[in-house]
Image (tube, helix red, strand yellow):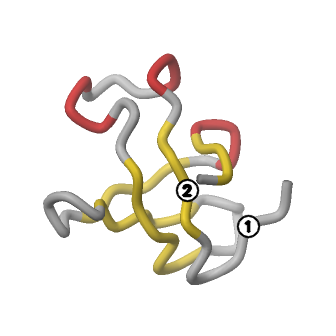
Amino acid sequence: MAFKDGDVVMVRKDAVADPKWGGTRGTVVEIIDNGQMRVRSDQTGDDKWFTPDQVVSG
Protein backbone atom coordinates (compact mmCIF):
# COMPACT_ATOMS: atom_id res chain seq x y z
CA MET A 1 0.00 0.00 0.00
CA ALA A 2 1.24 3.49 -0.79
CA PHE A 3 1.06 5.80 2.21
CA LYS A 4 1.04 9.59 2.12
CA ASP A 5 1.47 12.42 4.62
CA GLY A 6 -1.51 12.62 6.95
CA ASP A 7 -2.46 8.94 6.72
CA VAL A 8 -3.42 7.28 9.99
CA VAL A 9 -1.45 4.07 10.50
CA MET A 10 -0.90 1.41 13.13
CA VAL A 11 2.55 0.00 13.87
CA ARG A 12 2.64 -3.78 13.55
CA LYS A 13 3.40 -5.48 16.88
CA ASP A 14 5.70 -8.03 15.25
CA ALA A 15 7.67 -5.47 13.23
CA VAL A 16 9.43 -3.30 15.81
CA ALA A 17 12.32 -3.72 18.20
CA ASP A 18 10.92 -1.15 20.64
CA PRO A 19 7.96 -2.80 22.43
CA LYS A 20 6.33 0.52 23.40
CA TRP A 21 5.70 1.24 19.69
CA GLY A 22 4.08 -2.12 18.88
CA GLY A 23 0.38 -1.57 18.20
CA THR A 24 0.75 2.20 18.38
CA ARG A 25 -1.63 4.28 16.28
CA GLY A 26 -0.22 7.42 14.71
CA THR A 27 -0.10 9.78 11.77
CA VAL A 28 2.42 9.82 8.92
CA VAL A 29 4.13 13.23 9.12
CA GLU A 30 6.97 12.76 6.61
CA ILE A 31 8.05 10.31 3.91
CA ILE A 32 11.55 10.32 2.44
CA ASP A 33 12.85 9.07 -0.92
CA ASN A 34 13.77 5.58 0.29
CA GLY A 35 10.17 5.00 1.44
CA GLN A 36 10.74 5.37 5.17
CA MET A 37 8.08 7.33 6.98
CA ARG A 38 8.09 9.29 10.19
CA VAL A 39 5.06 8.42 12.31
CA ARG A 40 3.82 10.60 15.17
CA SER A 41 2.19 8.65 18.00
CA ASP A 42 -1.38 9.69 18.84
CA GLN A 43 -0.73 8.82 22.51
CA THR A 44 2.63 10.46 23.23
CA GLY A 45 3.29 12.85 20.35
CA ASP A 46 6.71 11.22 19.84
CA ASP A 47 8.02 10.53 16.33
CA LYS A 48 9.77 7.41 15.04
CA TRP A 49 10.86 6.21 11.59
CA PHE A 50 9.35 3.07 10.03
CA THR A 51 9.42 1.24 6.72
CA PRO A 52 6.13 0.62 4.89
CA ASP A 53 6.13 -3.07 5.87
CA GLN A 54 6.19 -2.13 9.58
CA VAL A 55 2.84 -0.32 9.49
CA VAL A 56 -0.71 -1.00 8.34
CA SER A 57 -3.50 1.39 7.47
CA GLY A 58 -5.19 2.32 10.71
Bin the neighbour count of mark 1 within 10 Å (Cα to Cα): few under 14, some 14-19, many 20 and up.
Answer: some
Coordinates of residue 14 in the picture (x, y in percent): 50, 17
Q: Tell me: residue 57, above or below residue 23.
A: below
Q: Secondary structure at mark 1?
A: loop
Label number found at residue 48: none
Q: Is residue 57 left or right of residue 47?
A: right
Bin the neighbour count of mark 2 within 10 Å (Cα to Cα): few under 14, some 14-19, many 20 and up.
Answer: many
Q: Secondary structure at mark 2?
A: strand
Q: Quadrant of residue 20?
A: top left
- Residue at the left extreme of this rendering: 44
Between the residue at mark 2 and the residue at mark 1, the CA separation in whole angstroms equals: 9 Å
Q: Nearer the viewer, mark 2 or mark 1?
A: 2
**Label 2, on which residue?**
9
Disc 2 marks which amino acid? Val
- Residue at the top extreme of this rendering: 14
* Residue drawn 36% across the image and 30% down it: 22
Q: Earlier in the sequence, mark 2 or mark 1?
A: 1
Tally the marks: 2
* Residue drawn 55% across the image and 66% down it: 8
Q: Tell me: residue 18, above or below residue 44.
A: above
Coordinates of residue 2 in the picture (x, y in percent): 83, 63
**Label 1, on which residue?**
3
Disc 1 marks which amino acid? Phe
Q: Quadrant of residue 44?
A: bottom left
